Image (cartoon, rainbow, N blue to C red):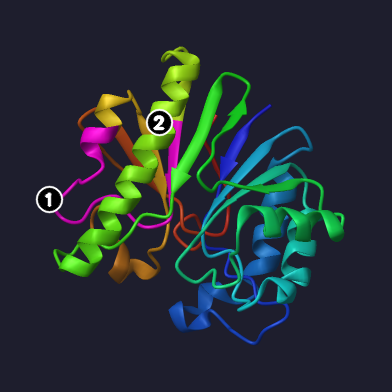
Amino acid sequence: MSIFVIADLHLSFETNKPMNVFGENWEDHEKKIENNWRNKVNEKDLVILPGDFSWAMKLEDTFKDFQYLNNLPGKKLLLKGNHDYWWNTLTKMRDYLKQNKFENIDFIQNNYYEYENIIITGVHGWLINGKEEDMKILRREKLRLEMELESITKQYEYKKEIIVFMHYPPYEKTEYPFAEIFEKYNVQKCYYGHLHGEQAYGDIKDFEYNNVEYKLISADYLNFDLAQVK
């Protein structure tokens, strides 16, 4: 059984929100993702989707987007992105999936997921720009992640590998506000999305800092394919 990841699907089956403003490579990106997905993933695999899954504004408007995802093989875990305005409480989202019989999808929100010998967790993340309002939200996100990692280590006593997924990049230039938390809880891999287009990627995409691997997994950066985690 394998673990795959891809962020920023930006599905819009029930809304008119074309993504080709980011480049011609976004044309028919849903078909590209589906074809690559079916060539790699089987029903026993796990796929993580760290944010910006759907352009829908309300949960009830996500039906076709979730239907698309539900029809693809594997178990899926979604994390909130900055454009997931439809995102709601964990109870309401799980009820919505249950009502529509979307049975192979769940969410990462103040929780974690055990898959074989690996623990999956993550947070939304936030901007790292020094503005006090943003720093307040960033501190909250750091606290949420640390609380989850603390809970995980109490239960598993560092006996399982922990992989963290985020929507926003966990760094900016020379600032790494999550690095101390990763070191404290022995996190060695962090996957993130949010960035689109070569100009946004910059020169730093996949790198290592303080023994932690940072990997960008936004859909267009991956050429609408899925990256294998394990």
For the record, the magenta segment spans 163-181
Residue assigned mark 2: 149
| Residue hosting label 1 | 174
Q: Is residue 111 magenta?
A: no
Residue 124, compared with residue 131, is above or below; it is above
Q: Position of residue 66 (x, y in %)?
A: 74, 62
Q: Secondary structure at mark 1?
A: loop
Secondary structure of the residue carrying tag 2 is: helix
Is residue 46 rendered to the left or right of residue 162?
Answer: right
Relative to 45, say whether 154 is above or below: above
Could you tell me residue 202's position as x and y percent? 25, 62
The quarter holding residue 173 reads bottom left
Is residue 219 left or right of 73 when viewed as pictured?
Answer: left
At x 41% / y 62%, what residue is drawn? 194
Instruction: Give the residue at x 26% y 42%.
Output: 178
Q: Position of residue 125 (x, y in %)?
A: 36, 54
